[in-house]
Amino acid sequence: MHEQSLNINKIREKVSDIKEAISFLKGYAHEKEEIFISNPEAVGAVRYYFIMLIEAAMNIANHLCSRLLEKAPSNYAETFLLLGKQGIITPELADRLARMARFRNLLVHGYAKVDDRKML
């Protein structure tokens, strides 16, 4: 692997975004399902923070693929899977993050109806 230097500031910025999103989402983690689902503002905010979290993780993963692997994945899920195959992250984490990338696509593009209960 030919390593180009990593942009640590970019990575720190994205990690900060992830921490912010996780902090917000934790506030809804134990919300009663009926209360959450009946609050469209809460549902929208949670969707937004999931997108923000996943986008930040994808940005970090794309940066690592570019700089460490010198590869451009064909889609967001593949970005994480490549990192798993190269041992940069565990295969289990790569699989979980790839599923998150697919979930992001559902949220952003509305390919299918999202069951908002699954966000709790």
Image: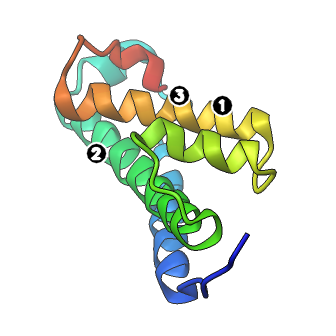
Relative placement, left or right, of 98 versus 106 is right
Pick the residue in front: 2 or 113.
2
Badge 1: how crowded within 10 Å, few (<14), some, or many (20+)? some
Query: Measured from the top left, where is residue 100 in percent x and y?
Result: 49, 34
Could you tell me how many numbered marks the image carries? 3
C-beta proximity under 8 Å, tags 1 and 3: yes
SS label for mark 1: helix
Measured Cα–Cα span from mark 2 to mark 3: 17 Å
Relative placement, left or right, of 84 versus 78 is right
- Residue type, mark 3 in image: Arg
Q: Which residue is mark 3?
A: 99
Residue 48, numbered label: 2
Corner quadrant of residue 76? top left
Residue 73 in view in this figure: yes
SS label for mark 2: helix
C-beta proximity under 8 Å, tags 2 and 3: no
- Residue type, mark 2 in image: Tyr
The colour style of the image is rainbow
Badge 3: how crowded within 10 Å, few (<14), some, or many (20+)? some
Q: Is residue 100 above or below residue 17?
A: above
- Residue type, mark 1 in image: Asp
Measured Cα–Cα span from mark 1 to mark 3: 6 Å
Pick the residue in front: 57 or 5.
5
Residue 95, numbered label: 1
Query: Measured from the top left, where is residue 6 in percent x and y?
Result: 59, 83
Query: Measured from the top left, where is residue 83 in percent x and y?
Result: 67, 50
Among numbered discs 1 and 2, the one appearing first in the sequence: 2
Q: Residue at x 58, y 38 (%)?
A: 97
Q: Is residue 62 above or below residue 77?
A: below
Badge 2: how crowded within 10 Å, few (<14), some, or many (20+)? some
Q: Residue at x 23, y 26 (%)?
A: 39
Q: Which callout, 1 or 2, points to the residue nearer the camera?
A: 1
